[in-house]
Amino acid sequence: MKICTWTVVLVASGCLMAGAAQAQQPAVPAPNPLDAVPEKMPFSTPYGAPISLEKAQAAIQAAVAEANKRGWPLNIAVVDSGGSLVTFARMDGAQLASIAVAQHKARAAAKFRRPTKVFEEAMQKGFNYLETIDGIIASRGGIPLVEDGKLIGAIGCSGGTGSQDEVVCTAGAATINK
């Protein structure tokens, strides 16, 4: 009887130790997508001369027209290729907190040479390192303005949902991005 009891105890202990050893085996980590090395530099549109006031105002007017058509009171900013404000419109009834956000979206789109939607999508995929980079805004509604293959500025919209902001910015950007 004692031999059977000890056998059961030893077998059970062995199973527990084997299970613990298996649990301690490190899982093979998934490859880190940040380790991929692209052949070409992404988002490498060269910076051009700053957008003119006339073109910036045309982009604002197109964006305001789109926002009015849809009944969305927004804040709309256009910055030059260096990220400095060129012109701004705050539609009647637009959210006050979104004034700075519209300008931030435009600056981020110009400085990083990409739509701010790229940052939003990356954050949703877990690329949280973006939080450590100054000037990032992970919200759609900032679009670079490219003329003759060169970035001349960017437009940023805020006050609605991200998708509303993006629709209005796209209308404004269409005056330049052909």
Image (tube, grey):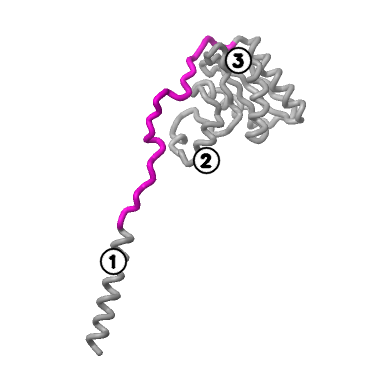
168 or 72: nearer the viewer: 168
Q: Nearer the viewer, mark 3 or mark 2?
A: 2
Residue that mark 2 sits on:
124
What residue appears at the point 72 percent right and 22 percent down from the top-left corner?
Answer: 64
Q: Which residues are magenta?
A: 25-51
Which label's residue is closer to the chain start, 1 or 3? 1
Report how far apart the C-alphas of labels 1 and 2 lie in the structure. Answer: 39 Å
- Determine if the magenta segment contains residue 84: no
Whole-percent x and y of residue 128? 46, 39
Label 3 neighbour load within 10 Å: few <14, some 14-19, many 20+:
some
Residue displayed at 53% across by 36% down: 121
Given the image, on which type of amino acid does mark 3 rest?
A: Val
Relative to residue 162, is residue 64 drawn left or right?
A: right
Residue 15 place in picture, x, y as percent: 30, 71
- Give the prevailing secondary structure in the magenta stretch: loop
Asked if 92 appears above or below 13 in the picture, the reply is above
Q: Which residue is mark 3?
A: 86
**What amino acid is labelled 1 in the image?**
Ala
**Does 35 lie within the magenta span?**
yes
Dot in front, 1 or 3 = 1
